Image (spheres, grey):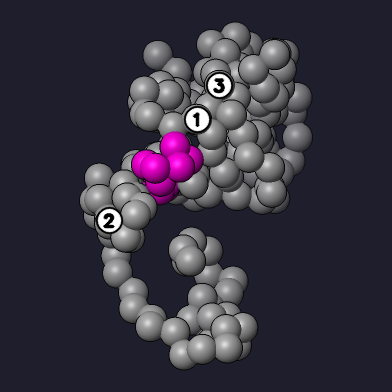
């Protein structure tokens, strides 16, 4: 189990209340690019900055699966405290596509996405025109929403104007 650090639940309490056996519980802060061996599985901690500066994912090598949390949702938020620029997100997506995985899991969804779905976010940013974005207020922030869809996937990027630097 991975505690996302979101702060709404206590992983240790959840385990203790929901498992019949006494768990062997320990916490470890994992540095980026650290590689863990879990028997027949090897997991590498991957940096995924964009949605927030310290976003990370877990690449399960034998499964060719990236567990990405909020860093790679279909709807990417770049406006809240700690979020980075479109330029940083673009760089992160390009680096992520170079990794060896076939699919990924993200936060707020139960769907498994194909790696190629990430290209729709890149194309969204490359085609982004602020006058074509939808202005809205998202949890108190004045934001713009850019929507893009093609055969590879659906992308919505919600951002504030201060996150606009792409090049």
In the rendered image, which residue does mark 3 sit on?
A: 116
In the rendered image, which residue does mark 2 sit on?
A: 36
Q: Residue furthest front?
A: 40
The structure residue drawn at horizontal position 54% and vertical position 81%, both measured from the top left corner, is 15
Q: Which mark is residue 137?
A: none
Does residue 104 lie above or below 94 as drawn? below
For residue 15, side relative to residue 47 (left or right)? right
Does residue 84 lie above or below 99 as drawn? below
Q: Tell me if mark 1 has few (under 14), some (14-19) or many (20+) residues whose alpha carbon lies within 10 angstroms of its own.
A: some
> Residue 75 placed where, x, y %?
65, 36
Q: Are marks 1 and 3 in contact (CB under 8 Å)?
A: no
Which quarter of the image is occupied by the C terminus? top left
Quarter of the image holding residue 28?
Answer: bottom left
In the rendered image, which residue does mark 1 sit on?
A: 102
Magenta segment: 55-66
The structure residue drawn at horizontal position 60% and vertical position 24%, both measured from the top left corner, is 117
Instruction: Tell which circle, 2 or 1, labels the residue nearer the N-terminal end.
Output: 2
For residue 3, side relative to residue 30 (left or right)? right
């Amino acid at each position: 189990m991975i505690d996302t650090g979101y702060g709404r639940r206590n992983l240790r309490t959840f385990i203790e209340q929901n498992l019949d056996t006494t768990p062997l519980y320990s916490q470890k802060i994992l540095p980026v690019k650290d590689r863990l061996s879990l028997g027949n599985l090897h997991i590498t901690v991957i940096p995924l900055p964009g949605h927030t500066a310290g976003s990370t994912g877990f690449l399960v090598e034998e499964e060719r699966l990236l567990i990405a949390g909020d860093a790679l949702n279909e709807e990417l938020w770049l406006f809240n405290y700690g979020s980075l620029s479109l330029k940083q997100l673009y760089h992160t997506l390009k680096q992520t596509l170079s990794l060896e995985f076939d699919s990924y899991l993200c936060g707020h969804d139960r769907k498994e996405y194909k790696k190629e779905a990430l290209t729709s976010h890149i194309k969204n940013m490359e085609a982004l025109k602020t006058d074509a974005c939808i202005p809205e207020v998202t949890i108190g922030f004045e934001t713009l929403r850019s929507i893009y869809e093609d055969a590879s996937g659906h992308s919505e990027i919600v951002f504030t104007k201060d996150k606009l630097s792409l090049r």
